[in-house]
Image (cartoon, rainbow, N blue to C red):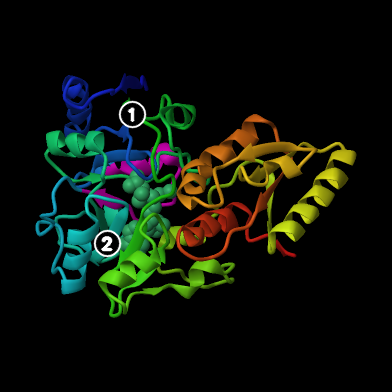
Amino acid sequence: METKFSIIKDVKEDEEKIREAAEFIKNGGTVVFPTETVYGLGADALNETAVEKIFKAKGRPQDNPLIIHVASKNIEPYVMEIPEVANKLINKFWPGPLTIILRKKGIIPNVTSADLNSIGIRMPDNEIARKLIELSNTTIAAPSANISGRPSPTDFQRCVEDLDGKVDCILGGAQSDVGVESTIVDCTVVPPIVLRPGGITLEMLKEIDSSIEIDKAIMEKPREGLKPKAPGMKYKHYAPNAKVTIISGERKKTIEKIKEMVHYNIEKGKNVCILTVEENVNEYTEGDCIVMGSIFNLATVAKSLFEALRKCDDLNADLILAEGYKEEGLGIAIMNRLNKAAGFDIIDV
Ligand code: TXA
Ligand code: MG
C-alpha cells in the first residue's frame, strides 16, 4: 500500500494535514502519529476491521490488548465504572504518560481488548495526537509504531523505517519527549497495581494514593508458564539485532568490567557498542560509545534509550554493553526496558 507522509510543524497551521489523517481513521485506515511517550500506530478502536489492520501491520500477537487514546477526560462511554482512585489519577496526570485500566463497556470490540473484559485508556499530552483523535471523532487504539519486538520509535524517521508501505499515513512531529511508553496502572483491582513502569513514577503515583503497588513480576525474568497481568509483558521486546548485556553495580567497577569486556570482544573481531552517559563516556577508549544523557537527569536517558538501541543496529553492533541504573524513580522504567532488550542478561559487579 502507498503510505502518505505528513510533517506537522504547527497544529493550527497544519490542521488540514491532520484532518486528512483523521479521514483515514474515519474510513477504517491506519495512521502513525507522535505522542509524548513514543509514536503510536492508530486506528478507530471501535471498528473491528480497522483494529485488525494494526495487528497485521505490526505483526503483533492477537492476544496482546491495545490501549485506547482519548482527547478528553470524559471516558464514561468506554468504561463500566470509574473508581475514586482512577478519577484522582486522571485529574492529576492527564493529559500525560499514564494509562489506566478499567472494566470496559461492550462498545469496545474484543479484538481491541484481546478478549479481556478490561481496557487501557490514556489521554496523550501531545497536541497533534489529541487533534487527530478529536477530528477522527472516535477513540484511537494505538500500540507503539514499531514492528513487533523492535525498540519503540521515538521519531518520524524510525516509524518510516518500520512501517512504510504497511500503513495509510505517517504523521511526523517532534521527537517524543518521555521516550518510554506510558506507565500502566490497573485500577480494576484493589490496591491498584502498576503493570508497566513509565514516565509517571511509582513515587509520583504513591503521592496520589499510597496503596498503589508495583507488580513484582516487572523486574524479574519471566518464569516458564507464568501468565503476566499485562499480556504484552511476556513477549520479547525492544530487541536490537545485537545481543545486549547489562553491567550493573558501583560506578568504577561497572566501567572496569565494561572496558574488560569491550577489549575481549574487539580482540575477537566483534563490533561492540556501549550505552553510557556523558559523565562516563570519557572513561572508554575502545568500542562505539552512545551517550544517552546524564546520570543526574534520568529523563534524558529515558528519552534517548530506544533511539540508542536502534543506533546500535545502524552501527552493525554484534554486542551491546549497557551500564545499569538504580531501580528507583525513572530508573525503574529504564531498567525494565533494558532488561527486556537484554533478555535479563545482567552482570552484577
Ligand atoms: O505510551 C504508550 O502507552 C504507547 C503510546 C503509543 O500511547 N502505547 C503503547 O502500546 O505502548 P503497546 O501496545 O505497545 O503496549 C500496551 C501494553 C501491552 O503490554 C499490553 O499487554 C498492555 O499494555 N495492556 C493493554 N491493555 C491491557 C489490559 N486491559 N490489561 C492488561 N494489560 C493491558
Ligand atoms: Mg509496544
Mark 1 against mark 2, which lies toward the viewer? Answer: 1
Q: In the drawing, what numbered circle is on residue 222? A: none
Residue with the mark numbered 2: 100
Q: Is residue 57 left or right of residue 325?
A: left
Residue 149 vs residue 199: left or right?
right
Which quadrant of the figure contains the C terminus? Answer: bottom right
Residue position marked by numbered label 1 in the rendering: 173
Residue 205 location, x and y as percent?
32, 67
Q: Is residue 63 magenta?
A: yes
The magenta segment: 51-69
Q: Position of residue 288 (x, y in %)?
A: 72, 35
In the foreground, 188 or 245: 245
Residue in the image at 63% along x and 61% along y: 344
Which kind of residue does numbered mark 1 sit on?
Gly
Q: Quadrant of residue 171?
A: top left
Residue visible at 26% across and 60% down?
119
User: Residue farthest to the right?
Assistant: 267
